[in-house]
Image (cartoon, grey):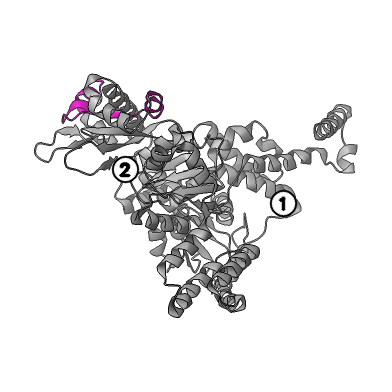
Amino acid sequence: MIPETFIQELRFHIDIEQLVSSYVRLQRRGRVAVGLCPFHNEKTPSFTVYPESQSFYCFGCGAGGDAITFIRRAENLDYPEAVRFLADRAGLRVPDEGSDDAGARLRLRILECNRAAARFYYDTLVSPAGARGLHYLRERALSDATIRRFGLGYAPAEWNALTHHLHSLGFSEEEMLAARVAASSKKDGRAYDLFRDRVIFPIIDLRGGVIGFGGRILEGEGPKYLNSPDTPVFKKSRNLFALNRAKSSKQQGLLLAEGYMDVIALHQAGFDHAIATLGTSLTAEQTQLISRYAREVTIAYDSDGAGQKATRRALSLFQQTGVKVRVLKIEGAKDPDEYMKKFGPARFRLLLQNCANATEFEINRLRQAYDLETADGKVSFLGEFAALMASIRNPVERDVYIKKTAGELAVSPDAVLQMVASNLKRRRGGEEKKQQRDMHMYVGAGAHGALDPERERNLKYALAEERIIALLLQNPDYYEYIAERIGPEQFVTGKNREVFSRLCERLRAGQSVELFSLSGVLNDEEMSLVSGLLACSPTAHHSREEAEDCIRVLRGRENERSSNEVAAMDEEQLRDYFQKIASEKKQRL
């Protein structure tokens, strides 16, 4: 059996779009790539690759899965052969069966090493040796409670303070280098501390593990902020600072700031729904992660030019997620941290309550880009304004902005409407083709797109089952909530029951349910099913309320029995059946 930790390592070395491109001629369409399906004959492209989820799905024949599934189909290989094929492509060696899983042990040691490093940094901060770091944090008005809550620390200026400490705890240089808390000297190859004379911000994942660090320099040369490079346990583009705390906030949505200090200052002031990226621009993967935990996000980037540019990019990324976006306009301060210090939390809360939505932000940006006092400026502005309006799906919202803007510019609303209609016509041409493909999608389709008769006979329950499966795939932390309320035996359709069972088994064991991990435990048909579900709602926000609705539908099936089924029951079965009906009625009253 191939160790799962090796499969996870392989996942980081394989890009599905690049892989599929060597078999299929792909064309980019926004955030996906499309081409003619290699698994059935077609003239119109319906084969879609999703780089964000590293999956593919064909809306024509129903084939779907991950990179391993694709290679199995394309090269007619079994699972181990497909893994070896991809490993050779990535320059990796597949561990021999029965051998020690070195990858798993290394990941565990990296997490242990990170935890020990975080403890060392914190202990140093609160000791005399950390006076410089503590002074900096005090100047930033952070309390002792906040420092403890975020586990902030200080890395001494010496070259080997941390490595010497970790050596004393039994960690090897190889483990420190793998954790990237240390680097290797080009001169003699010895390990030295990566972070020196810096205030340290531990990066904690959703499970509470320390996966990396950010460090702010206090003086001297070097980047202002230094962040951990990617490791086997840490990918900057797939994590968010403080999401482990913000996801439990009772405040509405999430508040996206630029840096560590902004987030920490916001939490200290009571805005515990603040998060930040990790030394990189916002990525599509991070917007997908945000969409799993919030239906609304407020962007609170810096007020300078770079911050405004980052805001526009973030708006573009969020456009496909279904998340409502608002933009905070910070006046009189550079960033949320400075605003809080100058005006206080009460004023900041008012700022939050009155911030513009994404459309208003874009309109204001366009206004600033053109001289609306001139005819040329008005025409140019209205051209971009019309394109912006065409992107708004709500016709009432669109109508409000058109009439308001036309009135302010003293132009005919009908003229603006004609420009918008022209843009809408072009947009709808492409959208209608996509919608037609989506409408004909065969979830759980067979080899030639044959529908599942059992699913068709029980469509109401199959849809509820599929929504629960999609929820678990996109929100694995909901497992315990679902498992307490429903089990595989209450699923009506066999295929969904089998997939749900496999997901529950893995989640119960603390294992991943990402597609790359599932390809070893699900067959091709089951992989197509789960890929189809993700393709149907790649950006949908699933909530516990939605899960409860689906569970209620399936549990209601127990009270729906045909007359023949009731007639075939013995006395004990009849008694249990009528007790269930009575109990359900009592709960609804």
Look at the image and tell me whether residue 192 can be seen: yes
Residue sitting nearer the eye, 331 or 488: 331
Magenta stretch holds residue 159:
yes
Tell me, for residue 454, which label it has, or none.
1
Badge 1 marks a residue whose secondary structure is helix
Between 573 and 367, the one lying in front of the other is 367
Q: What residue type is labelled 1?
A: Glu
**Which residue bears the numbered disc 2?**
230
Which corner quadrant holds the N terminus?
A: top left
Span colored in magenta:
144-170
Are the residues tagged 1 and 2 within 8 Å (C-beta)?
no
Going by the image, does 10 lie left or right of 407?
left
Hey, what amino acid is under mark 2? Asp
Residue at position x 64%, y 48% in the image: 466
Q: Of all residues shown, which one is farthest toward the left? A: 187
Q: Position of residue 444 (x, y in %)?
A: 62, 54
Residue 267, image x, y percentages: 45, 34
Query: Vertical placement of 494 versus 218: above or below?
Result: below
Q: State which mark lies toward you, 1 or 2.
A: 2
Q: How far apart are marks 1 and 2 (CA)?
A: 46 Å
Give residue 497's quadrant in the image: top right
**Secondary structure found at label 2:** loop
Q: x%, y% of residue 327?
A: 48, 52
Q: Which residue is drawn at 32% across and 32% down?
A: 110
Q: Earlier in the sequence, mark 1 or mark 2?
A: 2
Is residue 64 found left or right of 92 in the rendered image? right
